[in-house]
Image: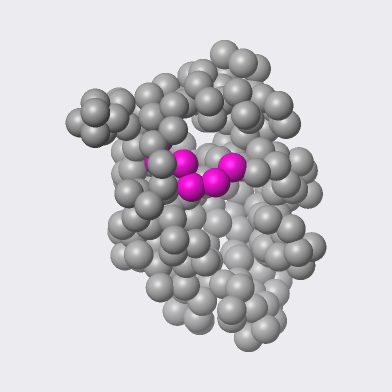
């Protein structure tokens, strides 16, 4: 039975589901809008400041049929955000196809470290130094969100901005634990380099998921 389940996971017909919840998008271009979040387990990118390290091990999260995931999502919102973990660890084609058949808008939050799968209305690319995005994801991204942990990350952000499409929206977002230190630096940087915008984790200020 375990082998059969693993085959379904490999095909994207089941996914290791960590959690799902209806809330307000807190970050980036769609901040302030209602959305249903689907958090998929599994990530080997390994950001030391990750605030959902419990998502890293996919075996900690039950393989769940995509039909059940889609039915739950359809009860709450037409905007669906798939996050992780790293959702592109898995084949996102079957789930996004099902969601779109049901009339939902599909968004993804990804490091871009794996090949792009699925059909997306919005791709938020948040690249990480430890495992850089694929060329395919760079070109497809609608927004680039670079996390600023220290001053060296500004140089990394500029290198990443060179790789995305010219219509991609550029954001700098302070890492939450460093926000008091980095927000003033980000503000100064954006004022000096207005192609960038500031993104904040507003859901944490609102004390919501």
Residue 118 picture location, percent across and down: 43, 28
On screen, residue 192 above or below 60: below
Q: Can residue 38 be seen in this view?
A: yes
Which residue: 76% across, 41% down?
34
- Residue visible at 61% across and 66% down in the picture: 173
Q: In which quarter of the image is residue 69?
A: top right
On the picture, is 189 further left or further right than 51? right
The quadrant of the rendering that contains the N terminus is top left
Q: Residue 48, how many percent across, how many down? A: 40, 73
Look at the image and tell me whether residue 167 can be seen: no
Q: What stretch is highlighted in magenta?
A: 15-20
Which of the pair 198/107 is nearer the observer? 107
Magenta highlight: main SS: strand
Is 21 above or below relative to 158?
A: above
Who is closer to the viewer here, 54 or 43?
A: 54
Where residue 73 appears, as percent x and y from the top left, is: 63, 30
Q: Pick the quarter of the image with the C terminus.
A: bottom right
The part of the image, by quadrant, that contains residue 15 is: top left
Name the residue rendered at 67%, 32% in the picture. Answer: 79
Q: Does the magenta stretch include residue 17?
A: yes
**149 horizontally vs 30: left or right:** left
């Amino acid at each position: 039975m375990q082998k059969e389940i693993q085959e379904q996971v490999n095909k994207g017909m089941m996914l290791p589901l960590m959690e799902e919840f209806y809330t307000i998008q807190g970050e980036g271009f769609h901040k302030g809008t209602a959305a249903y979040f689907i958090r998929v387990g599994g990530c080997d990118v390994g950001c030391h400041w990750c605030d959902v390290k419990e998502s890293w091990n996919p075996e900690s999260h039950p393989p769940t049929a995509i039909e059940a995931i889609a039915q739950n999502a359809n009860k709450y919102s037409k905007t669906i955000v798939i996050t992780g973990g790293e959702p592109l660890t898995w084949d996102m084609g079957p789930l996004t196809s099902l969601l779109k058949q049901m009339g939902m808008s599909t968004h993804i939050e990804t490091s871009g470290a794996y090949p792009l799968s699925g059909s997306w209305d919005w791709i938020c690319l948040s690249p990480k130094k430890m495992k850089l995005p694929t060329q395919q994801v760079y070109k497809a991204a609608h927004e680039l969100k670079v996390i600023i942990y220290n001053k060296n990350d500004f140089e990394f952000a500029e290198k990443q901005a060179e790789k995305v499409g010219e219509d991609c929206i550029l954001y700098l977002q302070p890492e939450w634990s460093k926000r008091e230190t980095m927000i003033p630096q980000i503000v100064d940087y954006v004022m000096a380099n207005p192609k960038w915008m500031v993104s904040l984790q507003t859901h944490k200020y609102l004390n919501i998921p």
